[in-house]
Image: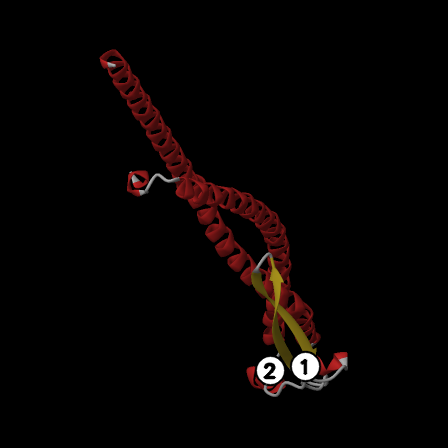
């Protein structure tokens, strides 16, 4: 038992009481942090699920259009049409702090502002299905980036929740009980020492009274 290795003094008792008070405050703060992290994590997880469904539906639609376009065009024409993209998207990755967790924040910027620049080909020798496929992918790109952002945020939040949970458990089941046990041990030892001191004082007093009585009898 750890308490038996501690010197039972009043100074140690005061120090352990301060440690216990700090541990209790930390336990409450970490529990509040864990609960808020869980709340925000669940909100992000719901948003992530909705985004995933939307992105998967958009990709499925684009794939269907590509299959139809490929069936109506020869492969050389299709490859030539998609060989040299006209539009370009730059991605800036930043961070934002949520409950001490740095989650990514993506910001995109296109090379040009013209919405028609997503088409890197002329419309004379291509099918409308190819236009629809390209448009579907262009429309779903912001949601794909947002989905990647949310999925990474969920991973980081889950890791922070687990770390916070371990700290809460360590305080609740190890540090606080050990401090309480140590306080109990020191208090018990101090009470024993105080009782022993009182008993010794009473014996000394009895011895002094007895000696005084014998002295008075001889006198």
**Residue at 61% from the left image edge and 54% from the top image edge:** 44
Work out which quarter of the rendered image holds the N terminus and state it.
top left
Does label 2 or label 1 sit earlier along the sequence?
Answer: 2
Q: Kindly indicate whether the residue at mark 1 contacts the one at mark 2 (C-beta within 8 angstroms).
A: yes
Looking at the image, residue 105 sits to the left or right of residue 183; the answer is right
Label 2 sits on residue: 78
Q: Return the x and y of residue 53 as percentages of the image width and height.
A: 61, 56
Above or below: residue 99 compared with residue 113: above
Q: Secondary structure at mark 2?
A: helix
Residue 32, by quadrant, is top right
Q: Secondary structure at mark 1?
A: loop
Above or below: residue 144 compared with residue 49: below
Label 1 neighbourhood size at 10 Å, few (<14), some (14-19), many (20+)? some
> Which mark identifies residue 126?
1
The outermost residue toward the left is: 218
Q: Return the x and y of residue 10 as percentages of the image width and height.
A: 41, 39
Looking at the image, residue 163 sits to the left or right of residue 107; the answer is left
The outermost residue toward the front is: 219
The answer to whether residue 137 shows anywhere in this view is no
Q: How many marks?
A: 2
Looking at the image, residue 14 sits to the left or right of residue 98; the answer is left
Which one is in front, 124 or 95?
A: 95
The answer to whether residue 37 shows anywhere in this view is yes
Label 2 neighbourhood size at 10 Å, few (<14), some (14-19), many (20+)? some
**Residue at 63% from the left image edge and 70% from the top image edge:** 106
Q: Return the x and y of residue 31 as percentages of the image width and height.
A: 54, 44
Q: Return the x and y of residue 155 as percentages of the image width and height.
A: 51, 58
Which one is in front, 7 or 166?
A: 7
Above or below: residue 103 compared with residue 190: below
Work out which quarter of the rendered image holds the C terminus and state it.
top left
Which one is in front, 187 or 129?
A: 187
**Residue at 42% from the left image edge and 43% from the top image edge:** 11
């Amino acid at each position: 038992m750890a308490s038996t290795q501690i010197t039972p003094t009043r100074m140690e008792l005061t120090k352990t009481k301060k440690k216990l008070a700090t541990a209790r405050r930390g336990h409450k703060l970490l529990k509040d942090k864990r609960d808020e992290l869980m709340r925000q994590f669940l909100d992000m997880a719901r948003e992530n699920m909705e985004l995933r469904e939307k992105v998967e539906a958009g990709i499925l639609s684009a794939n269907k259009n590509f299959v139809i376009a490929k069936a109506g065009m020869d492969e050389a024409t299709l490859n030539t049409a998609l060989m040299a993209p006209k539009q370009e998207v730059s991605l800036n990755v930043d961070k934002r702090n949520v409950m001490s967790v740095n989650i990514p924040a993506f910001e995109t910027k296109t090379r040009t502002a013209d919405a028609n620049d997503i088409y890197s080909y002329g419309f004379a020798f291509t099918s409308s299905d190819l236009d629809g496929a390209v448009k579907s992918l262009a429309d779903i790109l912001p949601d794909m980036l947002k989905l990647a952002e949310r999925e990474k945020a969920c991973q980081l939040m889950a890791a922070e929740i687990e770390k916070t949970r371990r700290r809460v458990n360590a305080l609740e089941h190890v540090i606080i009980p050990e401090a309480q046990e140590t306080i109990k041990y020191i208090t018990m030892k101090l009470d024993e020492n105080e009782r022993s001191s009182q008993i010794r004082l009473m014996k000394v007093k009895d011895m002094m009274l007895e000696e005084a009585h014998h002295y008075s009898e001889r006198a």
